[in-house]
């Protein structure tokens, strides 16, 4: 509880937090917020205030750390602007366009950055900052994207559908349409990597795109599921919801 009170102190964000990510193999985390800032939080035991990155001119909606270059942080905001930061220097080193909703580096290698803007998923070459593929097909705005642990596939979620894309073939491999529940978010299954977990309105749905266009559905929350995360080490899935609960599943 002592650590939590420090995270929520007056030195933190002044508006709701939109995303949180760990530095790989570290206790350091970064958070983004509607207050247009990114904060880098060290281990609470140090007692030091967070490092503030303040150059965005719009609400910061997402962020992620490069899996190999631990000083490289990416953030995106509400006007499609993407910024690369050197967190050792606390400065922005590059600005380009291509994401308004979410950004996620390719696991293991970090060669690509997956982003979503409106109803399109962009695949960006990290070295050149150029879009090398555009995945189109969603009718509604893409709410969430995630990689498989090997960095070969990207899953994308809009309220009406889920799609699985091949990074190297640049095409949609599988599509699942939402029925009575609007899709909100997704993550890979930590044990069965070709299975995906989709968060919807009050429920979780397990989807094996190679086997069927149907899902296994089970009730999870009293309100819409807002985010999902997987742990390869524990083979557990965490879900958060607008019902203000965090749940762990195995």
Image: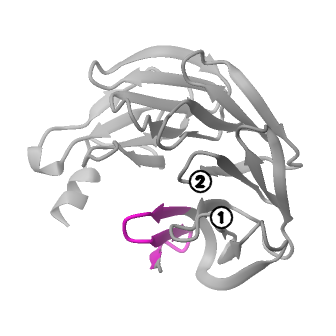
Q: Position of residue 229 (x, y in %)?
A: 50, 62
Judging depth in this view, the residue of 225 and 149 nearest the camera is 149
Judged left or right of residue 32, residue 224 is: right
Asked whether 56 or 27 is in front, the reply is: 27
The foreground one among 88 and 132 is: 132
Is the residue 136 above or below the residue 75 in the image? below
Residue 54 — which label? none
Give coordinates of residue 33: x percent, y percent: 47, 41
Secondary structure mostly taken by the magenta-highlighted segment of the chain: strand
Q: Residue at x 19, y 58 (%)?
A: 3
Q: Is residue 237 found inside the magenta-colored segment of the image?
A: yes
Q: Are marks 1 and 2 in contact (CB under 8 Å)?
A: yes
Per the rendered image, the range of residues in magenta is 228-248
Residue at coordinates 63% horizontally, 33% vertically from top-left?
Answer: 78
Quarter placement of the N terminus: bottom left
The label on residue 148 is 2
- Find residue 18 and report its horizontal and vertical position in percent: 51, 47
Q: Is residue 150 left or right of residue 80?
A: left
Q: Circle 1 sits on which residue? A: 194
Question: Dot 2 lies on which element?
Answer: loop
**Vertical side of 196 occupied by 70: above or below:** above
Distance CA(mark 1)–CA(mark 2):
8 Å
Answer whether residue 196 is visible to the viewer in this image.
Answer: yes
Residue 222: in magenta span:
no
């Amino acid at each position: 509880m002592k650590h939590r009170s420090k995270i929520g102190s007056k030195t933190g964000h002044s508006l709701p937090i939109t995303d949180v990510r760990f530095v790989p193999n570290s206790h350091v985390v970064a958070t983004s917020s509607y207050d247009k800032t990114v904060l880098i939080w060290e281990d609470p035991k140090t007692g030091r205030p967070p490092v503030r990155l303040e150059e965005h001119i719009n609400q910061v909606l997402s962020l992620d750390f490069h899996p190999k270059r631990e000083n490289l942080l990416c953030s995106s905001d509400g006007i499609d602007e993407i910024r690369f930061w050197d967190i050792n220097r606390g400065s922005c080193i590059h600005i380009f366009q291509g994401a308004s909703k979410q950004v996620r580096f390719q696991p293991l290698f970090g060669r690509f950055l997956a982003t979503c803007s409106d109803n399109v998923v962009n695949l960006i070459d990290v070295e050149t900052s150029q879009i090398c593929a555009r995945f189109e097909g969603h009718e509604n705005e893409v709410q969430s994207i995630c990689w498989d642990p090997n960095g070969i596939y990207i899953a994308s979620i809009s309220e009406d559908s889920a799609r699985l894309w091949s990074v190297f073939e640049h095409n949609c491999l599988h599509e699942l349409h939402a029925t009575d529940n609007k899709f909100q978010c997704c993550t890979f299954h930590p044990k069965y990597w070709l299975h995906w977990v989709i968060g919807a309105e009050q429920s979780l749905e397990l989807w094996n795109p190679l086997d069927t266009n149907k899902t296994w559905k089970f009730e999870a929350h009293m309100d819409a599921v807002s985010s999902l995360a997987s742990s390869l080490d524990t083979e557990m899935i965490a879900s958060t919801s607008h019902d203000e609960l965090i749940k762990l599943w195995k």
